Structure formats: structure tokens, C-alpha cells
Amino acid sequence: MDEYNLSIEDISDSGIRIDKYLATALPEKSRSYYQKAIDSGFVLVNGKQVKSKYQTCIGDEIVLSIEPVKEINIEPEDIPLDILYEDEDVIVVNKPKGMVVHPAPGHYSGTLVNALMFHCRDSLSGINGEIRPGIVHRIDMNTTGSLLVCKNDKAHNDIASQIKVHSINRIYNGIVLGNFKEDSGTIDAPIGRNPKDRKKMAVVNDGREAITHFQVLEQFKGCSFVQFKLETGRTHQIRVHMAHIGHPLLGDDVYGKSVKNLIGQTLHAKTIGFIQPTTKEYVEVDAPLPDYFEKLLTKYRKEIN
């Protein structure tokens, strides 16, 4: 363990929550990282464990223990890619179900990034760090469909700016539980960490703005085929919003319930539209529905005929 020793000697550093102070004093880690370190007992103030809400005082001696950073080698892997569009700045791939977008604990190989590194060689943006080259946005492991990747930093900054002002056109298809009285609607409900389970997201009063527009395409016995248009792009946004209104995605084992012979939520990123960073022309790409999704639709259509 690496150990850091800090002393509160300046009045401007007193009266501050310990997690906020650490994030300011040692900005290489996030505030949430320090909150977890405090909760795990890796932060001592005057030799004692404290909580994140502890306020610093003049004379406090703080000892922080941090696991040393482990070097991670992310290797290119010859994994087939379904490329929907590619130019010198960006590439749009059709991500299959079950593929993790970028390396993370437990998933250092077999990810989309491993495949992209093989296909693009050295042509991937580096803004998001060595384990997320090219990645400017992402979709969940069990969500399929269009994913836009940047091949250089200029394109990355441009696309990130489009995402920030919500000008990227993102349309999803999903099958949800239950039927609707209305043909369309808008869910405007802020999303943040679930206070009871930090691994999940939830609609919370102090969350970030999240807006999802939906249109019902077909209704079956006990479920519906729905199109979603994202105005914002929060983590798990569609899954959280649909569960919030009582229509969780079919097979969503986090926000709904699992379904036999179905792996994860039935959600597909169908369309992505953006302004090409160099030509400034509008580009729109569609990913066809995966086979498992088409088979479900065929099955449900037969049941109502």
C-alpha cells in the first residue's frame, strides 16, 4: 500500500468535508474514490477512522493508504467487427450482445476495445486513457447496436461536444413488459446513484437531468415493442426510466426480472446520427435488429394472430 500523510495547517483547509478535502489535495483521484477509501477504513484522522462527512480541523493529521496502481496491458485481439460506417475520423460498429465495450476489472480481454485496437492499429483517440481508447460514449454489455468510436483526438473532442449539447441523434428499440394506453410519451426524471444500492442507478431528486421520449410501435400479449429517442445520455437511462414507469425492459435482471433463455435486457441501439467532425456533413447509421430480437417479435406477433 502507498501511504500519504497530510496535515491541516491552513485555516482555508479547515471546516471542509474530509472527502472533499482529499479530492482537492490529491486531485488524481475522484471524490467518490476517496469516499470509498474512507468507508473502507483506508483514511485515518489523528489515528482514528472517520466518516466522509467529517469536517477537517486545524492540526488534523491525515493518513491515507492507497493500493498501488497496477499496470494493465490491453492487447489488440483479432475479434471480428460488424462495421456499419468508417472514415478517417470515426468508426461505427454494431456491438453484439454480451460484449463489454472497454476493459474493466474481470474483463481485460475480449472487449470491443481489444477488437478496435487490432482493426484500427494506432488510429484511436487517447483522451479517455489507455483502457478506453476511442471510446466517447458506450452502451451496456447486453445492449446491442450502433456505437460511435473516434479515431483521433480532434474527432473525439468534436463528438464529445455534440454529445454534451444533446445534438447526437440516438434512437433505440426495446421490448418492455406490459401494454400502454398512450401511443407515445416523454419521461423527464433525474437519474443518479441508487441510495440503497450504489451499483444501480435510480430516479432520484438530486440526480442529473434525464429525458427519454418513447413511441409504442406494437403491442402484444403482456409486452410491447417500443422506440426510444434519447435527449440525454445517463447511465442505464432507458432501463431506469422504463422501470420507473412500470414497464421494465424484457429480460432486464437489474431493473426488472430475468427471463428464461434470454441474456439481459432486450434493448438495441438502432440509429446514431452525428455531424462528421471534418466535413461537417450529417451522417446517420442504422444497425439492423439482432436475430434474437427478430425471433422474439415473430413469436409475439404469432401469438396475437
Image (cartoon, grey):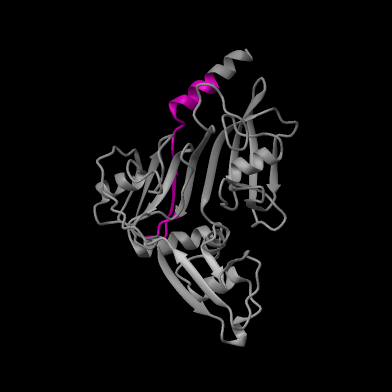
Q: Is residue 143 magenta?
A: no
Q: Outermost residue toward the bottom?
A: 10
Q: Outermost residue toward the right?
A: 181
The residue located at (41%, 42%) in the rendering is 100
The residue located at (44%, 37%) in the rendering is 287
164 above or below 187? below
122 above or below 183? below
The C terminus, quarter of image = top right
Q: Position of residue 288 (x, y in %)?
A: 44, 33
Q: Position of residue 63 (x, y in %)?
A: 50, 71
- Left or right of 79 on screen, residue 197: right
- Left or right of 255 on screen, residue 138: left
Judge by depth and name the residue closer to the eye, 112 or 169: 112
Judge by depth and name the residue closer to the eye, 32 or 118: 32
The residue located at (32%, 39%) in the rendering is 81
* Image: magenta residue range: 275-298
The N terminus, quarter of image = bottom left
Judge by depth and name the residue closer to the eye, 64 or 173: 64
Q: Position of residue 244 (x, y in %)?
A: 69, 41
Residue 109 sits in quarter: top left
Q: Position of residue 74 (x, y in %)?
A: 29, 51
